[in-house]
Image (cartoon, grey):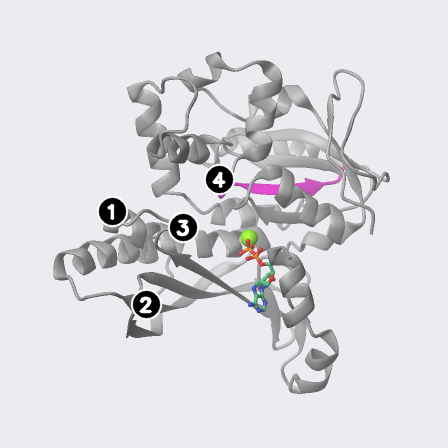
């Protein structure tokens, strides 16, 4: 049983939600998106998300604690960005094997530097002895009807991603000695930075509320994550191989790969924390301008479009070489 089947089977209880939710607390969106949305008065919604990082699974035991503090919050901010929500605050559940002052000083420095930058204060939490794990619950707000859900994509919408894909995975595979080709020193620096210091696309997410029909953040890799949008919106997709390749940005490493390998690398990513979103084609010009005016968000790449075909992965004719479609329902 996969993670998503497990959640579906044991934790998704829409009937219970309808029964138990207080009449004054309207749950506008429950399990299944980057954040849940709770109605706050007539015009605003509270966006809530939790992410848990476990030593050995999400980070190496010897990782720089300052970067770990940063990343723990960044991955949560990224879920807010994916909904187009603005940060309000977060709680921290920390399980620690022992109290090491140097480690805690560095970890909290990384955490608070990003909290301050994002105007997102730590407002509570819990601390216990145990294997090292970091659980953060983050809260944000978004105007009613503004949030970028996974289910809003329409037939024929363009599909975009922000920034450069695949760098964090390259950094991870380098640290695990799994790369087939050598990684230059310049690439090592950039890829480890991408892995350990991800940047949540908060400003981009907010700006996209005007244009995008659906969005999520790329945490598991584009091919799997895009399927969440396609499934929720009951659509298929065609992806443009040349744009997938372009979305890798410039690293020395790519010259070792064939075009097909490059496209696969972009699809398989993981830990990218870029946004993937859909938008009607009438917004192409506006999105191109938005991208040019905000180089700090990384370039927006239009990597494909949605289709009605919901069948499994297929190849189509050049230049639309790759199609990734959801499994039959
Ligand atoms: P993300 O990668 O955006 O953080 P996940 O893939 O972790 O999202 O989770 C998918 C959805 O399932 C989210 O809406 C999340 O809130 C929900 N979810 C995950 N685990 C649980 C759980 N144990 N109980 C309830 N909901 C869960
Ligand atoms: Mg997410």
Q: Residue furthest left?
A: 101
Give the image location of residue 167, x and y in percent: 44, 31
Q: What span is colored magenta in the figure?
A: 273-280
User: Mark 2 or 3 closer to N-term?
Assistant: 3
Q: Nearer the viewer, residue 264 or 207?
A: 264
Res 144 visible: no
Q: Nearer the viewer, residue 318 or 57?
A: 57
The residue where tag 1 is placed is 62
Disc 4 and disc 1: Cα gap in Å?
21 Å
Residue occupying image coordinates x 45% and y 57%: 76
Disc 3 and disc 1: Cα gap in Å?
12 Å
Q: Nearer the viewer, residue 142 or 319?
A: 319
Query: Do the CB atoms of the residues marked 2 and 3 lie less than 8 Å apart?
Result: no
The residue where tag 4 is placed is 272
Numbered label attached to residue 85: none
The secondary structure making up most of the magenta span is: strand
Give the image location of residue 218, x and y in percent: 55, 44
Query: Do the CB atoms of the residues marked 4 and 1 lie less than 8 Å apart?
Result: no
Residue occupying image coordinates x 30% and y 69%: 130
The residue where tag 2 is placed is 94
Q: Which class describes the residues within 10 Å of circle 3: few (<14), some (14-19), or many (20+)?
A: few
Q: Secondary structure at mark 1?
A: loop
Looking at the rendered image, the disc whose residue lies closer to the viewer, 3 or 4, is: 3
């Amino acid at each position: 049983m996969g993670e998503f089947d497990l959640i579906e089977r044991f934790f998704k209880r829409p009937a219970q939600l309808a029964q138990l939710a207080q009449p004054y607390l309207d749950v506008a969106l429950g399990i299944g998106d980057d954040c849940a949305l709770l109605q706050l008065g007539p015009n605003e919604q509270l966006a809530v998300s939790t992410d848990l990082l476990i030593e050995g699974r999400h980070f190496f035991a010897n990782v720089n604690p300052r970067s770990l503090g940063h990343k723990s919050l960044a991955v949560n901010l990224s879920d807010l960005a994916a909904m187009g929500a603005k940060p309000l605050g977060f709680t921290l559940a920390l399980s620690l094997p022992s109290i090491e002052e140097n480690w805690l000083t560095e970890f909290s420095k990384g955490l608070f530097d990003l909290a301050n930058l994002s105007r997102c204060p730590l407002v509570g939490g819990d601390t216990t002895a145990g294997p090292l794990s970091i659980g953060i619950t983050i809260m944000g707000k978004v105007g009613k009807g503004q949030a970028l859900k996974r289910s809003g994509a329409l037939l024929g919408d363009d599909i975009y991603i922000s920034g450069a894909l695949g760098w964090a995975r390259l950094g991870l595979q380098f640290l695990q000695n799994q790369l087939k080709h050598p990684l230059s020193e310049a690439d090592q620096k950039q890829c480890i930075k991408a892995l350990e210091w991800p940047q949540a696309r908060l400003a981009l997410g907010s700006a996209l509320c005007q244009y995008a029909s659906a969005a999520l953040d790329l945490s598991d890799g584009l091919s799997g994550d895009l399927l969440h949008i396609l499934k929720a919106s009951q659509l298929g997709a065609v992806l443009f191989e040349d744009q997938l390749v372009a979305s890798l940005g410039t690293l020395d490493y790519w010259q070792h790969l064939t075009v097909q390998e490059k496209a696969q690398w972009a699809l398989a990513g993981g830990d990218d924390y870029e946004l993937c979103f859909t938008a009607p084609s009438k917004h192409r010009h506006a999105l191109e301008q938005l991208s040019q005016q905000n180089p700090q968000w990384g370039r927006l790449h239009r990597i494909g479009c949605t289709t009605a075909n919901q069948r499994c992965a297929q190849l189509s004719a050049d230049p639309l070489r790759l199609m990734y479609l959801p499994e039959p329902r």
